[in-house]
Amino acid sequence: MDGFQDTFYKCFIKDDRYMMMLDGIGVTIKVALLAAILGIIIGFFIALCNLSKKKFLNIIGKVYTDVIRGTPSVTQLMIVYFVIFASVHWEKWIIAAIAFSINSGAYVSEIIRAGILSVDKGQTEAGRSLGLNAKQTMVNIVVPQAMKNIFPALGNEFITLVKETAIVGYVGLVDIQKAGDFIKSATYEAFMPLIGTAIIYFVLIKLLTIGLSKIESGLRKSDAR
């Protein structure tokens, strides 16, 4: 027991090393949240490209999803950071979030596309018969109905995104994972920092899962049972 306490003290209390973990939590949340917001925006437009009757837009959507889904996220992160934004003096976490949003957008686009296609075609026809144009029908009728099918999958994508941000250390950001690595290197203790990192991620994901479940329940209150 004394050995456990000594190791815990050395890893988290001594030199206020716990502050490094707390700062890492903030970085993880910032990157994941901004990436999720931008990813949904990108995904929506790519989904519209994939659903469009214009061949040019279809090609753009297909190439985008194929390239992003066919390459590792860590490679995309380094390309965005060290190549595309190499001369841009933005904060590191913003650039990292953009990289993750580009990656997430490809997966979100498929989620949105499938959700829109799940809405009965009769709903679109009904909107058009009421005098709405294609854009108005999509925004006012199709998308609100599709959201109930889309939201659970979007929630899962956000959860995945939180865990994927563990690679931001490759571009010099100190997130939860990188903070744990620094503590491990400073103390020569592997078990405690790694278990601490895992517990923090588990708690974050659990809280996020509970919150998303409550939102989903609210969206489905109007469903007929």
Image (spheres, rainbow, N blue to C red):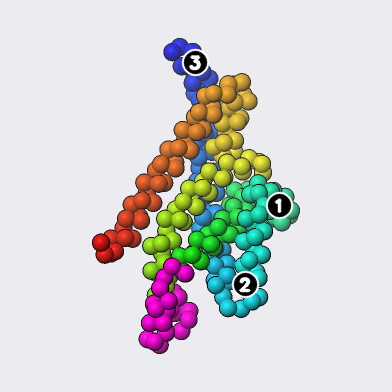
Q: In this view, does 219 lie to the left or right of 114?
A: left
Q: Mark 1 points at which residue?
A: 79
Q: In which quarter of the image is the C terminus?
A: bottom left
Considering every residue shown, the one lying at the far left of the view is 225
- Tell me which residue sits at (58%, 21%) in the image: 189
Towards the viewer: 187 or 91: 187
Q: Residue 156, image x and y in percent?
A: 46, 51
Q: Distance between the residues labelled 2 and 3?
A: 60 Å
Tell me if I can see residue 7 in this picture.
Answer: yes
Residue placed most toward the observer, 187 or 88: 187
Magenta segment main secondary structure: helix
Q: What residue type is labelled 1?
A: Ile
Q: Which mark's residue is nearer the viewer, 2 or 3?
A: 2
In this rendering, does residue 38 appear at all?
A: no
| Residue under pointer 3 | 6
Nearer to us: label 1 or label 2: 2
Looking at the image, is mark 1 or mark 3 nearer the viewer? 1
Q: Mark 2 points at which residue?
A: 58
Kindly report the distance in space between the C-alpha atoms of the residues bearing marks 1 and 3. Answer: 42 Å
Write the start and end of the magenta stretch as one range.
Answer: 117-140
Q: Residue at x 49, y 15 (%)?
A: 6
Q: Is mark 3 on a helix, strand or loop?
A: helix
Q: In this view, does 47 lie above or below 91?
A: below
Counting residues from the start of the chain, the first of labels 2 and 3 encountered is 3
Q: Nearer the viewer, residue 94 or 39?
A: 39
Q: Which of marks 1 and 2 is nearer the N terminus?
A: 2
Q: How many marks?
A: 3
In the image, residue 132 lies at what x, y percent?
42, 84
The amino acid type found where label 3 is placed reads Asp
Q: Which residue is drawn at 61% across and 43% down?
A: 168
Element under disc 1: helix
